[in-house]
């Protein structure tokens, strides 16, 4: 007989992964605790998805108000109360994190406040107390990666957390180091709020992971709005002086170096798994050299009753992936036949236009040996896009040539993230381009552009010339 444990499940971390795991385990009748050393909701709710989307919305409203003059609506001179903007954003975060606390109470999840570390494979210390659990889920998330030579002070040189506090005045010249999703989202925010923004990316392309054509189309739209970016470029050092931050920028191809001056620098060069002070070795849990705690399809680590989910377990570091893995771990513990077997995990850049994709890029499909056909439908041919004043972008569909099986969907355009649900479901259901083309989509909607991209695969789109 096993000895009596304090909990059936103890979750470490109350981010999207951790709180999903805790709530689902409780729903399934288990006695659950969730340890969190900071605010519940993790990175996503506190300093990630939610506050960035709030700032993106505010910036877009300002840009939209400026564009309204096109159809005759003008508002006079724009003014921005920055304290109010920061307060509004913080209010949304507070409401949502409060919601998670209420859900814990409603589901009888014990919230243990404090830093958690392993004592042995069934014992975890939280603050000064120790607790035992039959199963433990590690959901400790990730933190911003650092860049040698550039010290983050969260005032003039910031990471994503510092960039969430909009300074007064808005920085005139801003540099974003890194050409990934987070960098572009902040560049878009600050560009709309009035900064002159430059992005530098070490690699030859922006938004790694995205389809090359879609990234190009997206980059074109960003440039049109005034966001400058350079690839194959790196920042070597940043020195704070009275007239600004002097950044040494190097072209990695030519080795040419120059110094440019900015008022604010954002370092957004990726994230690394967070296992500081977790003492995973006391439980015999394997941590890789890069700090990840690998898990199998049932989210089990190398120790059978210890699970790892979300950012700490693997890439891609996305909230919806963490959430799904949390549910899987909880269900596996409850004896359900669950596994992380998603066909595809969607990715989104929440700018305007958005860049959103799910499934394989054209290059990935070819690498996997598929013979592919593609269909592209431009938003400039969409009546709905015109009525929204947002005609930059396209829908690109990647399909297996002989079977017509859908492999990937890549969208640059407004509400691309919301349109992606259809594409994700289609991939999960093993739909063909014909299945999508035969589905009646309401008119006029942006969703029709997905239908037309499917028709374009067969060279039968109606609203464009098919070449
Ligand atoms: C600026 C930004 C914007 C983002 N936008 C999006 C987006 O739009 N969509 C999207 O899908 N993803 C987005 N992400 C990524 C998303 O935030 C993460 O993928 C997600 O939060 C991961 O969830 P998680 O549960 O694995 O970990 P986290 O959210 O990192 O939560 C881990 C929690 O564990 C706690 N913790 C860590 N160690 C301990 C310990 N030893 N003891 C107790 N508690 C501990 C931490 O305090 C934290 O609350 C964004 C990230 C950033 C930084």
Image (tube, rainbow, N blue to C red):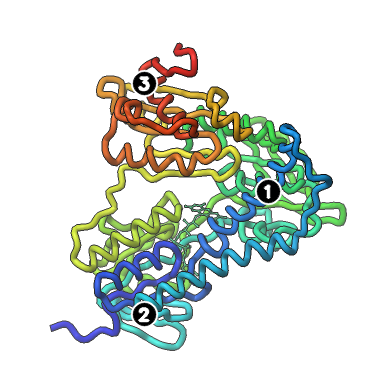
Dot 1 or dot 3: first in sequence order is 1
* Residue occupied by mark 1: 59
For the N terminus, give its image quadrant: bottom left
For the C terminus, give its image quadrant: top left
* Residue occupied by mark 2: 124
Question: At x 36% / y 80%, what residue is drawn?
Answer: 124
- Front disc: 2 or 1: 1
In the depicted structure, whether residue 171 falls above or below residue 22: above
SS at mark 3 in the image:
strand
SS at mark 1 in the image:
helix
**What distance separates the C-alpha of mark 2 from that of mark 1?**
44 Å
Residue 216 visible in the shown view:
no
> Alpha-carbon neighbours of circle 1 within 10 Å: few (<14), some, or many (≥20)?
many
Furthest residue to the right? 243
Dot 3 or dot 2: first in sequence order is 2
Q: Position of residue 238 (x, y in %)?
A: 73, 52
């Amino acid at each position: 007989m096993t000895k009596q444990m304090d909990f059936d499940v103890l979750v470490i971390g109350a981010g999207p992964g951790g709180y999903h795991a805790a709530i689902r385990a409780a729903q399934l009748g288990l006695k659950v605790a969730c340890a969190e050393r900071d605010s519940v909701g993790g990175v996503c709710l506190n300093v990630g998805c939610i506050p960035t989307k709030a700032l993106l919305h505010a910036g877009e409203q300002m840009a939209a108000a400026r564009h309204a003059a096109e159809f005759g609506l003008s508002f006079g001179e724009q003014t921005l109360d920055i304290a109010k903007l920061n307060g509004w954003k913080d209010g949304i975060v507070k409401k949502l994190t409060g919601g998670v606390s209420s859900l814990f109470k409603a589901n009888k999840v014990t919230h243990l406040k404090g830093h958690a570390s392993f004592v042995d494979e069934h014992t975890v210390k939280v603050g000064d107390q120790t607790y035992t659990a039959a199963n433990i889920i590690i959901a400790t998330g990730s933190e911003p990666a650092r860049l040698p030579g550039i010290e983050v002070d969260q005032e003039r040189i910031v990471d994503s957390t510092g960039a969430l506090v909009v300074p007064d005045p808005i920085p005139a010249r801003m540099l974003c180091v890194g050409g990934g999703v987070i960098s572009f989202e902040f560049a878009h925010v600050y560009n709309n709020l009035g900064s002159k923004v430059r992005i530098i990316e070490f690699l030859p392309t922006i938004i790694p992971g995205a389809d090359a054509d879609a990234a190009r189309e997206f980059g074109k739209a960003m440039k049109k709005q005034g966001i400058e970016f350079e690839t194959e470029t790196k920042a070597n050092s940043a020195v704070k002086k009275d007239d600004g931050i002097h950044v040494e920028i190097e072209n990695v191809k030519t080795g040419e170096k120059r110094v440019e001056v900015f008022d604010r620098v954002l370092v957004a060069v990726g994230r690394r798994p967070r296992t500081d002070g977790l003492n995973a070795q006391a439980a015999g849990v394997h941590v890789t050299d890069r700090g990840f705690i690998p898990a199998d399809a049932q989210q089990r680590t190398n120790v059978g009753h210890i699970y790892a989910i979300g950012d700490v377990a693997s890439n891609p570091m996305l909230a919806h992936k963490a959430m799904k893995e949390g549910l899987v771990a909880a269900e596996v513990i409850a004896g359900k036949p669950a596994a992380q077997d998603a066909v595809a995990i969607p990715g989104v850049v929440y700018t305007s236009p958005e860049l959103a994709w799910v499934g394989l890029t054209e290059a990935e499909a070819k690498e996997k040996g598929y013979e592919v056909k593609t269909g592209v439908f431009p938003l400039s041919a969409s009546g709905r896009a015109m009525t929204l004043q947002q005609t930059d972008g396209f829908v690109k569909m990647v399909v297996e040539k002989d079977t017509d099986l859908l492999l990937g969907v890549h969208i640059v355009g407004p509400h691309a993230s919301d349109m992606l649900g259809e594409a994700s479901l289609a991939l999960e259901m093993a739909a063909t381009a014909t299945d999508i083309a035969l589905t009646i989509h309401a008119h006029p909607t942006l969703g029709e552009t997905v239908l037309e991209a499917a028709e374009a695969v067969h060279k039968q789109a109606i609203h464009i010339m098919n070449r």
